[in-house]
Image (cartoon, rainbow, N blue to C red):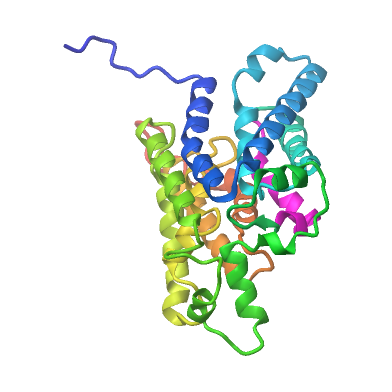
Amino acid sequence: MNNSPYIRQPASVQTVMLKVLLALLPGIGAYVWLFGAGVLVNLAIASAAALAGEALMLKARGRPLDIYLADLSAVVTAWLIVLTFPPIVPWWLTVAATLFAIVIVKQLYGGLGQNPFNPAMAAYAIMIVAFPALISQWPHSGLDFATQLDLIRGGSRNIDAITGATPLDALRTGLRQAVTPMTVQQVIAGGPAFGVLGGKGWEWIAGCYLLGGLWLWQQRVITWHLPLAFLAGIAVFAGALWGIDPGAFASPLFHLVSGGTLLGAFFIVTDPVSGATTPRGKLIFAVGVALITVIIRTFGAYPDGIAFAVLLMNICVPLIDMKTQPPVFGHKDD
């Protein structure tokens, strides 16, 4: 027998952030299985840097440390940064990216709930512009942990033999730098980075992010609007290009399971602070991110454009929310 009251109590920030961290665990597990345990070291480094940066800024602003440090929002940001970086980036780059996200993008704008830009995506964007080579060095599957740890500590990075490009980067490079013109199918067929649907092993990571994201939806941490609109937008825009010339453009399925698409769908565009808040606004925001992502992936200088797409749409959020506000109950929509 059900008892009143029937109104759901709002979840605390700590509860929501804890669920996000739990939802990331399947993807992290697949990440470790494919690339090795180096990512766990960077997760620890980033988490420590995030909490230290948060504590420093809270103290400078005269805010209580225990309440804000315990809400886990800084740790979520740290984890998302690490999961967009190669697992062998040097420790100082991880620390620099995390401190930039926490100190500059989050705290200088007023802390949690005040930042207009997604902190993790801002950190990724600034680092890939400043250090493109380091952000592009992804290890081959099976690289031993000792080597990974040495690289994280700042060891010699003459590692062409043990690193490779991501699927999106490999496809872009193959199409643009081939001596003779090649089709997408020829590049994928001859490339060791490619698997059945997308990147070799990346399909499993994408699937694990999908499982975690669906659990967040089931737990009502996120709504369906943002992930569904983003994934549908990727499929439609990439599918349109693929339909025009399948030899020059990758299929929508390749785009969906490669790069950070599934991570972005459930853990990036769903950021409740920097994203749109109205139901229609969420759809517009997510479709805009999808369109810009496909444009950058296909025609831009960077293999994956989710971070830049999110930041560009963050700028549009105030206008989107203003134009999509539902009418006040009892009043006609103007």
Residue 64 pos. (x, y %): 71, 12
Q: Is residue 240 magenta?
A: no
In the picture, measured across the screen, residue 169 lies left or right of residue 131, that is left
Q: Is residue 129 magenta?
A: yes
Q: Is residue 96 above or below residue 220?
A: below
Residue at the location (42% across, 35% down)? 216
Q: Is residue 267 in view from this perspective?
A: yes
In-front residue for pair 190/58: 190
Give the quarter of the image for residue 11. top left
Residue 290 pos. (x, y %): 51, 58
* Total labels drawn: 0
In-front residue for pair 223/54: 54
Q: Is residue 82 above or below residue 196?
A: above
Q: Main secondary structure of the magenta part?
A: helix
Q: Is residue 183 above or below residue 123?
A: below
Q: Is residue 67 above or below residue 284?
A: above
In the picture, measured across the screen, residue 228 lies left or right of residue 126, that is left
Q: Which residues are magenta?
A: 113-135
In the picture, measured across the screen, residue 84 lies left or right of residue 248, that is right
Give the quarter of the image for residue 213. top left
Q: Is residue 270 in view from this perspective?
A: no
Give the quarter of the image for residue 80. top right
Residue at the location (79% across, 19% down)? 61
